[in-house]
Image (cartoon, rainbow, N blue to C red):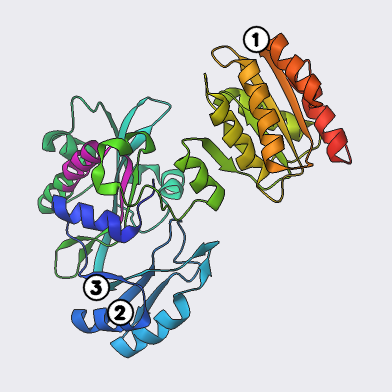
Amino acid sequence: MKLLEFEAKTILKEYGIPVPRGRDAGTPDEVELAAREIGGPVVLKAQIPVSGRGKAGGILFADDPAGARKMASGLLGSTIKESLVNTLLVEEALKVDKEYYLSVTIDRVAKSYVVLASIEGGVDIEQVALASPEKVSRYWTDPLSGLDKKQAREILARFDLSDDTAVELASMLTILFSAVMDKDAELVELNPLVRTTAGTFVAVDARMIIDDNALFRHEEFADRSLSREDETPLELEARKQNLAYVDLPGSTGVIGNGAGLVMATVDLVHHFGGSPANFLDIGGGGSVDINRRGLLLVLSKPEVKGVVVNIFGGITRCDFVAQAVIEAIEESGTGKPIAVSMMGTNEAEGKRMLDEAGVMNFPNMEEAVQGLLRVQGGH
């Protein structure tokens, strides 16, 4: 779950990371009031879960409250990088002397956490790593061993930093690592972390991504877990039903049991000239009801012109899936074609049920995909 900037900053502030004075606002009136409370020039930042919003017009500077209100009127309700702007973060505009980059994230290749630090902040860290690798320091560490200040100083040792700056940055790295562990985060990033002309260190921008699988351990995110701004309505509905679903831009619905099998089916649809409309993993051992709800969800998408159901019946019973398909067709009243490939537990019974109901079924997934695309039209 991606937290919005103001949410991430609220958490980091509690851990002792300094952030600019300011608050979130949802109307021009609230923006003007926030600007008056801050006093002086302010920055308005669209709260959307995407990067690169600055270049897309999502970050604006205002000299006074009236200017902030005028800018907010244009920014609120607009769409930036396909995300609707409902909330702005209004913050004091700082006088910056130097920008840095700090983060802790998961290195899935190394199967470990990696701590990153750079003396080049405010820009894409991947580009810095490519253009000037000497400006980026990496340190892989185990969550059980943690990260102490001595290790944090070692991370920063390759840079020519003053003692005071090294102490400040090392302290913030250890804080970030603690926040990642406590919140089950996949990423915490400060970019930029700035040193102001007054000599103080402030996190001007912050990102935090929480591991979805750990949300049950965090009651503090309970009211956020069902309202992610980067989800489609069908993805939200699927998550309410504990279904693993991702919307795709095509016209062929894809259902399977097991992420690998679903991905293989998505690839097959592409291979045979189709365009997947979704990815839905109904998991293993699901009941008739779970399978039925999954198919109804996919069928409800207007762009879907047909659905391929690809099942390997290990702990999933093929007769349960067949019953679910039959019930979903009856309940939805859809005329959209459905092609099924199933093999494994109770396969013969499942195919018998589909045959009797007049549902297309095939001996393997290749034929199922090709059969559906032919009926769906044009392939």
Q: Secondary structure at mark 1?
A: loop
Please identify, in this view, whether the residue under mark 3 or under mark 1 is nearer the observer: 1
User: Is the residue 321 above or below the residue 302 in the image?
Assistant: above
From the viewer's perspective, tell me whether residue 246 is left or right of residue 207: right
Of callouts 3 and 1, the N-terminal one: 3
Residues packed near mark 3 inside 10 Å, few (<14), some (14 to 19) or many (20 plus): few
Q: Nearer the viewer, residue 220 or 60?
A: 220
Real-space Cα distance between discs 2 and 3? 24 Å
Residue at label 3?
A: 95
Give, as a single range, the part of the protein colored magenta.
172-191
At x 22%, y 57%, the residue is 10
* Disc 1 residue type (three-letter): Asn
- For the question of whether residue 175 can be seen, the reply is yes
From the viewer's perspective, tell me whether residue 86 is left or right of residue 232: left
The quadrant of the rendering that contains the N terminus is top left
Q: Nearer the viewer, residue 91 or 94?
A: 91
The quadrant of the rendering that contains the C terminus is top right
Prevailing secondary structure class for the magenta stretch in the rendered image: helix
* Disc 3 residue type (three-letter): Lys
- Name the spot of residue 96 as percent of width and height, x first: 25, 68
Q: Nearer the viewer, residue 308 or 29?
A: 308
- Check if mark 3's residue and mark 1's residue have beta carbons within 8 Å: no
Of callouts 2 and 3, the N-terminal one: 2
Residue at label 1?
A: 346
Which disc number belongs to residue 25?
A: none
Q: Does 42 appear in magenta?
A: no
- Name the spot of residue 18 as percent of width and height, x first: 17, 59
Please tell me in which quadrant of the rendered image residue 293 appears: top right
Of callouts 1 and 2, the N-terminal one: 2
Residue at label 2?
A: 30
Q: Secondary structure at mark 3?
A: loop
Residues packed near mark 1 inside 10 Å, few (<14), some (14 to 19) or many (20 plus): some
